[in-house]
Image (cartoon, grey):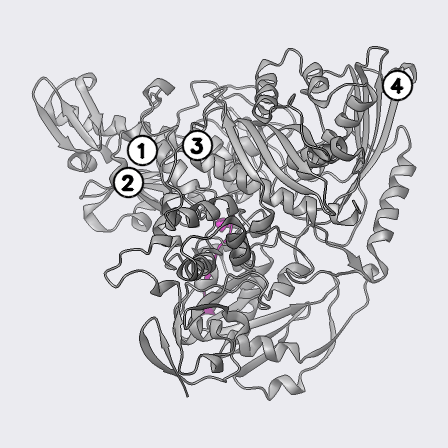
Amino acid sequence: MSDAETMADSPKKKGKWTRRAFIGAGVVAGGALVVGVAVRPGNPIDRLSPMLANGQDEQLLNAWVKVGADNVVTAVIPHVEMGQGVYTALAQMLADEMDADWATVRILEAPADKKYVSDSIGRDFLFPDLEVPEIFEPTVAGGILELAQAMGLQFTGGSFSVRATGQRAMRTAGAAAREMLIAAAASEWNVPATEITTENSMLSHAKSGKSEPFAKFATAAAEQSLPAKPKLKSPENYKLMGKPLARHDIPEKVDGSAVFGIDANVPGMKYAAVKAAPVVGATVASMDASAAKAMPGVLQILNMGDFVAVVADGYWQAQQALNTIDTQYSKTEGDDLNLDGLFARYDSYLNDAGDDGGDIETEEGDVADAFVRATTKVEAEYKVPFLAHATMEPMNCTAWVRDGKCDVWSGHQAPVNARQAAADAAGLDFEDVTYHNAYLGGGFGRRSEKDNIEMAVRIAKATGYPVKMIWSREEDTMQDHYRPSATSRFQGGLDADGKAVSWSNIHTHLFDPQEAPTVPYYNIANHKIRKVDVPTHLRFGPWRSVDHSQHGFFIESFVDEMAHAAGKDGYAFRRELLAGSDRHLKILDLAAKMSGWDQPLPEKHGRGIAFVPSFGSIIAQVAEVDMSGAKPKVKKIYVAADAGFVVNPDGFIAQMESAIVYGLTATLYGEISIKNGAVQQSNFHDYQMLRINEMPEVEVQIINGDHKRLGGGGEPGLPPLAPAVTNAIFAATGTRIRELPLSKHSFA
Amino acid sequence: MINLTINGQEKAVEVDPATPILWVVRENLEMNGTKFGCGIAQCGACTVHLDGQPVRSCSTPISQAEGKSITTIEGIADEDGTLSKVQQAWIDVQVPQCGYCQSGQIMSATALLTKNPSPTDAQIDAAMAGNVCRCGMYGRIRQAIKIAAGIEQPTTKETIA
């Protein structure tokens, strides 16, 4: 950073908001994080113009929107589309503030350029609790950009897009663009700007009867300075936000024309199949490829050290040849590890931590004292397994390294990171790499890793011609970055009235978000939450809702156990814990009401409730299960959600449906196990997916509780699902499920 | 040389007869709408029609298509580009999310409705259980099939409480 005065001390410190330094600084795991500086009014328009505008007919208004000569408004979206509907929702936000004609709005994904790193993501990712002073809220491409750039964040994940980029950048950009167009028209028409109105991409002046399309003033508007503080609409003036508009990306997803990473088509390209060492960290000790060499279409067989690649004229030829190669691998420390051994290791670390060891995450009051004095003591231990992402599109990447340049085609959640990873793997500069992003055939966190990018670039560098690398489903399952397995132990105390007075938890690992194991929304006077880090050789990765996926289950199961011990109904007990938090209570009450909580159910049926705020959204779910058969049958899920303000209700509901299926698949079946250090599951026959015949009915209702502070949509629907289901199983059968998945348990 | 008809067009391809239809369609014929998911007929992403019957193209050798007619996702709209009833219903219900499995879903649904224009829920389950959707759009897929079949009309529900 150029100005040392603007640097703050540490990422954890909440810096004071001054004009000179309105954000702190520091370092986050895995990457450098630098310093935020004062408002930096630089408009990146000059550098970006050649990348986005096609000739003289189009003028860029600012980094997030362009207006064409045909009066088409194009929203430039600094996020990737993986089915979450981000293109449409963000375009809605921009177009609404701009008063653009929705029927002609187009969407363009931002290029993988560091200028597109979203400053709002940087801010929300690093400083989620910081309220932005009003004076800084509407600045376009402000100082946090530098901070985010340093982190390489052009990242789609963390349920951030709408609540951060949309709320801060897209709306501001739309409003700024509108004000710049108005200023240009006011100047041309020689009328006060306040008398000009905008609607459907048109500017009008009622008194003089003048009316012209935006395009007429695009050139002049681009010469206006960026407004320091464009005025954003209040909800009663929203025209597009809050409407269930149809998604832009759907038509091309029903006729086969949508292009995913795996569909890259580069003239002259060849195909690679790969097999990495089954135990992470091992290398190829020796290989016998004599049979493969003689197989049709095979061009090259590459020992890349950590993996073997066969390059052939066709993918199937490459994979068939690869299957014949006999490979021996080096020994690693992970070779002796089995899943039971790993959970035993977790136990031993937890035991060693005892009553006071481990790292304290939150502590309030005196838990030990409150627990000793408690009338009723509740203790429980829960376990969850490793999970793979199993995106429908297996990992892949196409690369071409030649003449000091590199082109890469893939679908990635962090295109700037992917571009940097390609540069590093090719031994080139960032500027020498062109990264082409495509639709993602499922992301869920998996496509935020860079292993596939690096592998494809290394292969392409070795061959010199363009190569499309495709992982088999087996490789995709066995070489994932897994949702960590975890063990969590609780002690809870209840007083004579059955009121919760202490809450103590110790668990293995903490990845992200940091608040996942905490329960600040529950009124429990004494609480203490600790973690122990336990080494494991498997690679961890973010998996839809990240640590909330484990802790939602742990916390809401234990709350249910405490309710039962208190002799109270799970819904009533949670109402007590949420007393005084009206917004939370509304959601809990709505879910209960939707489900007919008090209504009787048939024999062997049960209802379970769970409540998990995450990613800025508050969600309660009630599951209804039928336990009359040999397997649990989840019949219906009721969802009550408060995400502040839902920009596209149908898209949000689709995210709830999707998170429920992702979570239910894991609850019923999901388990990655390890034997001799290697993952045992390989394909959908042994890593089972939920199918249409098992789909529960899903009913969603939304409360818009705070239009100023939005919550996420992609992930928060997942954490309450597992405990809602297992609490329902308890209600139906009296059997408490403390270990997932359900397929490990017998209900006959 | 293998002679086949794909989406009404006659083609000859020079490939190993054991090559799965999937890879011939994607790599030799350069039609990318049909997707690779699992390679072992467990997920349905690669579903195409062979003489009108749905098959998993990842596990069906091209030799079995010799002299037969293959239909892929690119071939189910009318020649003038008008979407099929199933495709249109998929848009009406906003079925796809990531969209990767949807070619296969639509091909399975199309085959079901050709054989059985008015399927029950159990028949929908039986015809569609081979198609995995990791984004979990099963409820919408069921609804879209019923709308395409004319059993249900598109509805809008009040969702803001």
Q: Position of residue A172 (x, y in %)?
A: 37, 28
- Disc 3 from disc 1: Cα separation: 17 Å
Q: Which mark is residue A105?
A: 2
Q: Nearer the viewer, mark 4 or mark 2?
A: 4
Quarter of the figure with residue A684: bottom right
The residue under label 4 is A376
Between discs 4 and 3, the one toward the N terminus: 4
Output the chain of dot 1: A
On-image quarter of the N terminus of chain B: bottom left
- Disc 4 from disc 2: Cα separation: 61 Å
**Contact flag, marks 3 and 1 (Cβ < 8 Å):** no
Q: Secondary structure at mark 2?
A: loop
The magenta region covers A401-416
**Dot 2 amino acid type:** Val
Q: Is residue A481 above or below residue A177?
A: below
Quarter of the figure with residue A300: bottom right
Output the chain of dot 3: A
Q: Position of residue A424 (x, y in %)?
A: 56, 59
A411 inside magenta stretch: yes
Q: Is residue A382 above or below residue A134?
A: below
- Disc 4 from disc 3: Cα separation: 44 Å
**Contact flag, marks 4 and 3 (Cβ < 8 Å):** no
The residue under label 3 is A649
The residue under label 1 is A95
In the rendered image, residues at marks 3 and 1 fall on the same chain: yes
Between discs 3 and 1, the one toward the N terminus: 1
**Dot 4 amino acid type:** Thr
